[in-house]
Image (tube, grey):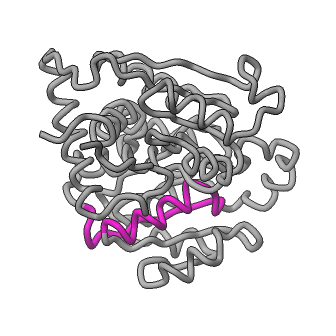
Amino acid sequence: MNRPVRHFLTLQDISPQEFRHLIRRACELKAMQRRGEIHEPLRNKVLAMVFEKSSTRTRVAFEAAMTQFGGSAIFLSPRDTQLGRGEPVEDTARVLSRMVDAIMVRTYAHETLELFAAHSRVPVINGLSDRYHPCQLLADMQTFFEHRGDIRGRTVAWVGDGNNMCHSYINAASRLDFRLHIATPEGYEPAAELLAAHGDRVTLLRDPHAAVADADLVVTDVWASMGQEDENSRRRQAFQNYQVDSDLMARAAPDALFMHCLPAHRGEEVSAEVLEGPQSVVWDEAENRLHAQKALLEFLLAPAT
């Protein structure tokens, strides 16, 4: 009997228990790889990777994950497929899902992902959209658990744009039961409906110093995401007081960690001193994209034992 298809478009698609399972499993898979153990639960499985946005970590992590699991991955860009010539998303989804075992989509509009999932016979994974970046949160939370233990009851400070990463941190706060302080300038807040839905976990502030006070984790992202390059000048002016520097980190808890999903713009959203400093775990965070996505692929594709 076939299992029902599970998609992973946002963190709301998994339960709090499943979220913690994925974190634990990612840590186990990481330890197994370090020991040189061969683990190939996805032998002969194929992942289609549809990229409308450029990528380093997402592409390499998913491709390496499938290879290490005994499967394979196919990279598809609009330049190389009929999507780039106007084929409807739903038609592409119908065709791809008859040929592969899962589809990862990295795109602009979140609605594109929802359309893919609605017409796919196989799991669809959000590799990033303008609304959410859930795969990054799997890696971020794995990294925190590795360094500091369970994040339940802790305080996380988000400093910067209320973007797709911020939205996924809001979802993570409700799933893993931590407090989230968001510091962002007026006009750059996260989606109002998300704030309203998770008001018991999230506090919106204007002052980044107040947001990071005694925080256990400080997180930021670039001020202008892909597709917003024409807003660079306006955004630099709006966010000039929102750089995560040593002074800001000093307001957080003494053992606070710093994270950034990368790529980072040193001297803009984060100082080089913080990014390269002892509280920064960004390189562990980046590596954990591989292990967290392996856990996710196994969860979605490997038969239950």
**Quarter of the image with the N terminus in it:** top left
Determine the image quadrant of residue 175: bottom left
Of 195 and 91, the residue lying toward us: 91
Q: Which residue lies furthest to the front in this view?
A: 1
Seen at 50% across and 24% down, the residue is 99
Seen at 24% across and 51% down, the residue is 145
Seen at 73% across and 57% down, the residue is 240
Relative to 288, residue 16 above or below: below
Q: Position of residue 138 (x, y in %)?
A: 37, 47
Which segment is the magenta one? 151-176
Q: Is residue 170 found inside the magenta-colored segment of the image?
A: yes
Q: Where is residue 147 in the image (x, y as percent from the top left)?
A: 24, 47
Residue 141 horizontal side relative to residue 106, left or right = left
Of 65 and 111, the residue lying toward us: 111
Of 231 and 86, the residue lying toward us: 86
Q: Position of residue 77 (x, y in %)?
A: 68, 23
**Quarter of the image with the C terminus in it:** top left
Relative to 177, residue 233 above or below: above
Seen at 22% across and 37% down, the residue is 303
Q: Is residue 195 found inside the magenta-colored segment of the image?
A: no
Q: How many marks?
A: 0
Determine the image quadrant of residue 67: top left
Residue 245 horizontal side relative to residue 289, left or right = right
